[in-house]
Image (cartoon, grey):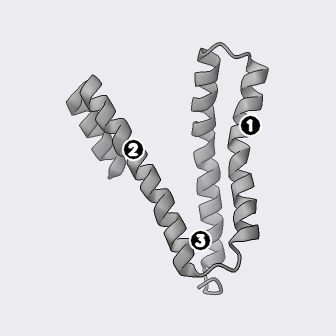
């Protein structure tokens, strides 16, 4: 499958998607740190450090997972996806009990869709 036509485009689109995702994530983290009273330079350094862990994880994956079978790679991706699903459900249910139930359910459903 790695040598199939279009697989390079798929890999490149995945990298671009991760990089694009990092922009709003970094802005959100930076706004939280600024709101907590951190100075702009300290905020920038912390956000850069946190977001750089993605690069570190990518390099570690290339080094340590290069010869791993597709079954184990699928298991790793399923584990990560399950973790994100748990966090999303946990946050949604936490907001339902604290805030407006219809607004939270509509936002969660539209985001899931």
Rendering coords of residue 103 (x, y %): 26, 31
Rendering coords of residue 88 (x, y %): 39, 44
Residue 63 is marked as none
The crowd level at tag 1 (other Cα within 10 Å; few <14, some 14-19, many 20+) is few
Spatial CA span between label 1 and label 3: 27 Å
**Residue at the image point whose x is 61% and y is 64% from the top:** 13
- Quadrant for the N terminus in the image: bottom right
Front in this rendered view, residue 14 or 44? 44
**Residue at the image point whose x is 52% and y is 79% from the top:** 71
Q: Nearer the viewer, mark 3 or mark 2?
A: 2
The crowd level at tag 2 (other Cα within 10 Å; few <14, some 14-19, many 20+) is some
Front in this rendered view, residue 97 or 8? 97
Front in this rendered view, residue 77 or 26? 77
**Residue at the image point whose x is 61% and y is 85% from the top:** 5
Q: Return the residue at label 1.
A: 48
The crowd level at tag 3 (other Cα within 10 Å; few <14, some 14-19, many 20+) is few
**Residue at the image point whose x is 56% and y is 80% from the top:** 70
Q: Secondary structure at mark 3?
A: helix
Rendering coords of residue 102 (x, y %): 20, 32
Q: Return the residue at label 3.
A: 10
Vertical side of 64 occupied by 102: above or below: above
Q: Return the residue at label 2.
A: 88
In the figure, is residue 107 to the left or right of 83? left
Q: Earlier in the sequence, mark 3 or mark 2?
A: 3
* Residues at marks 2 and 1 touching, judged by CB atoms closer than 8 Å: no
In the figure, is residue 97 to the left or right of 88? left
Q: Earlier in the sequence, mark 1 or mark 3?
A: 3
The residue positioned farthest toward the top in the image shown: 37
Front in this rendered view, residue 91 or 72? 72
């Amino acid at each position: 499958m790695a040598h199939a036509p279009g697989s390079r485009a798929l890999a490149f689109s995945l990298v671009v998607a991760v990089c694009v995702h990092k922009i709003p994530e970094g802005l959100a983290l930076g706004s939280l740190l600024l709101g907590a009273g951190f100075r702009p330079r300290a905020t920038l350094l912390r956000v850069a450090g946190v977001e750089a862990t993605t690069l570190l994880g990518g390099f570690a994956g290339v080094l340590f997972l290069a010869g791993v079978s597709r079954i184990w790679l699928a298991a790793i991706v399923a584990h990560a996806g399950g973790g994100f699903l748990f966090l999303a459900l946990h946050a949604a249910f936490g907001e339902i009990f604290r805030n407006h139930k219809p607004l939270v359910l509509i936002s969660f459903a539209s985001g899931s869709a």
